[in-house]
């Protein structure tokens, strides 16, 4: 068509995070080689092409900007993100009306974010009878299929061809890691079968099978995390749970088997809470099941340090499930129980690195929940300072332990947030400098670790913003410009990383504001 943009994304700024996600997905999407020739834009070599997304808030008392009007005129397709916010937005309605007037023959694609069509469709869409192109809600198409429907609408490629090729592409991408997980699951199934067939060798078979469980919880888990495929662990974890259920009632399991079973449940809760489409109801059920197991073990041996520690992890994960769901009252209840268990562990093994770290985590978790619920900030500050004291003690025991260094840096970062919010900028600066010192050392120790580079950029941004508050604008502005360039490069290295992309946007906004 000769247009400059393949699509124009129209949305309410209340839905900006959804629009940013869709914009990034469309601009980086590459049509599968086998169907690229079917696209209306075959000359684009499989790319959809540029997509327009207005990044600035429109003035309240003016019409659409000239840039927006020009972009509408230069767009092949209009994609409308429909929601309760979009329905109430006069700008979304104007963009639809203007697109129809400028290009009456060009397609308009409606994509639902939340609410029913009658609740989320802007009036011009309802009046025009535009069909629903994609339902991005979990209970609808979901994000993955919804994206493919939008791609099909923009490119003219049949949806079934896209779905088939997308499935094949995804299958190839995960085959190598899935084969490893499948081999482990198969081995578990074989060991379970052998255990049933060889009662006389039950103890030996149990040791071998549970040795494999331990491997799945440690080495395999680490490998899958390293390639970003913890979702594959779902099937492996389920196989491990099948093994324990095949052993009979919990009363029939030996103590060490029950302990491993609890650790499997902890791992499953962690995986479920980390997945974008995780099920909070399932997470809570598994956390409570782990709690039941560790409670039973602890009641049988209340002074056993290992059982106290494992029970504390059950309490922590239950609190974490509620924290992720923004249910802070229940999160606080379980974090208080976790803190009490950490204190108990410290009484049983007072001179161990593990008990020092648990005491620190107990104080830190409570501080975070209280900080987010605007509880007594003086108390919050005391809790973060307590966490710092315990982590510092742990670091004295293990000066080279990078995990301890990371958690100590994290505690300093939270303490700086409290001081910053209280306008105590000198104290905030001191805590931020401590955090940044650890982050620099950790990043230098692993220069290829991009996550550590990101943590350092976050620490540098906090330092720069605090320097500005203290009137040291010139040097801070220069550092903001430098870290904005580094943040942009980091985000470009992995466009799928939402945290890096959002941080790059913040860094760019800082430069625009303070330069």
Image (spheres, rainbow, N blue to C red):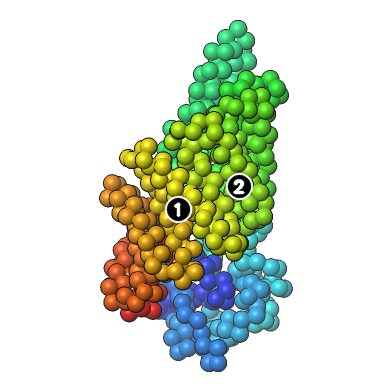
Q: Is residue 446 visible?
A: yes
Quarter of the view holding residue 52 = bottom left
**Residue for badge 2:** 335
- Residue drawn at x 41%, y 64% is 427
- Residue 504: image location, x then y, percent: 39, 66
Q: What residue is drawn where x is 63% and y is 24%?
A: 301
Viewport quadrant of the C terminus: bottom left
Q: Nearer the viewer, residue 34 or 75?
A: 75
Q: Which residue carries the number 1 mark?
A: 411
| CB atoms of marks 2 and 1 within 8 Å | no
Q: Secondary structure at mark 1?
A: helix
Q: Is residue 92 above or below residue 181?
A: below
Q: Residue at x 58, y 36 (%)?
A: 344
Of callouts 2 and 1, the N-terminal one: 2
Percent x, y of residue 499: 45, 59
Residue sitting nearer the eye, 275 or 156: 275
- The residue at the far top in this view is 200
Residue 51 against residue 273 in the figure, above or below: below
Image side of residue 496 versus residue 303, left or right: left
Residue 233, horizontal then vertical, whole percent:
52, 38
| Percent x, y of residue 450 | 34, 53
């Amino acid at each position: 068509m000769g247009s400059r943009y393949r699509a124009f994304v129209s949305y309410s700024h209340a839905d900006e995070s959804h629009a940013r996600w869709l914009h990034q997905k469309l601009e980086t999407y590459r049509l599968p080689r086998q169907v690229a020739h079917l696209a209306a834009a075959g000359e684009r070599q499989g790319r959809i092409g540029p997509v327009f997304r207005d990044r600035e808030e429109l003035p309240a008392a003016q019409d659409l900007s000239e840039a927006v009007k020009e972009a509408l005129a230069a767009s092949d397709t209009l994609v409308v993100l429909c929601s309760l916010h979009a329905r109430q937005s006069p700008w979304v309605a104007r963009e639809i009306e203007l697109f129809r007037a400028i290009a009456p023959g060009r397609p308009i694609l409606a994509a639902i974010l939340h609410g029913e069509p009658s609740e989320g469709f802007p009036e011009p869409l309802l009046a025009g009878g535009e069909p629903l192109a994609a339902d991005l809600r979990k209970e609808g198409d979901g994000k993955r299929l919804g994206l493919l429907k939008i791609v099909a609408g923009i490119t003219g490629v049949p949806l079934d061809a896209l779905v088939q090729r997308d499935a094949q592409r995804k299958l190839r991408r995960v085959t190598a890691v899935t084969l490893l997980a499948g081999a482990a699951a198969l081995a578990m199934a074989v060991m379970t079968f052998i255990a049933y067939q060889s009662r006389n060798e039950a103890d030996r078979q149990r040791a071998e099978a549970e040795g494999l469980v331990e491997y799945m919880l440690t080495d395999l888990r680490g490998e899958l995390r390293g390639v970003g495929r913890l979702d594959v662990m779902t099937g492996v974890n389920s196989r491990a749970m099948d093994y324990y259920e095949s052993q009979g009632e919990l009363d029939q399991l030996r103590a060490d088997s029950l302990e491993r079973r609890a650790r499997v449940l902890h791992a499953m809760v962690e995986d479920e809470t980390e997945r974008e489409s995780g099920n909070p109801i399932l997470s809570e059920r598994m956390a409570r099941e782990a709690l039941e197991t560790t409670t039973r073990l602890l009641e049988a041996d209340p002074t056993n340090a290992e059982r106290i520690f494992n029970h504390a992890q059950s309490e922590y994960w239950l609190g974490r499930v509620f924290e992720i769901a923004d249910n802070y009252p229940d999160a606080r209840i379980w974090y208080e129980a976790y803190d009490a268990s950490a204190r108990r562990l410290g009484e049983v093994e007072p001179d161990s690195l593990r008990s020092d770290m648990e005491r620190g985590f107990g104080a830190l978790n409570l501080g975070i929940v209280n900080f987010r619920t605007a509880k007594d900030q003086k108390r919050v500050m005391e809790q973060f300072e307590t966490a710092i004291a315990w982590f510092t003690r742990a670091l004295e025991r293990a000066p080279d332990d990078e995990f301890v260094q990371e958690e100590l840096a994290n505690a300093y970062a939270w303490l700086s947030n409290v001081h910053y919010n209280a306008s105590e900028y000198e104290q905030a600066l001191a805590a931020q400098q401590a955090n940044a010192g650890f982050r620099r050392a950790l990043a230098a120790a692993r220069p290829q670790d991009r996550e550590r580079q990101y943590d350092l950029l976050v620490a540098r941004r906090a330092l720069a913003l605090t320097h500005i508050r203290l009137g040291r604008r010139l040097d801070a502005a220069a550092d903001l410009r430098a870290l904005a360039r580094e943040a942009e490069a980091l985000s470009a290295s992995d466009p799928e990383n939402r945290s890096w992309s959002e941080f790059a946007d913040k860094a760019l906004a800082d430069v625009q504001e303070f330069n």
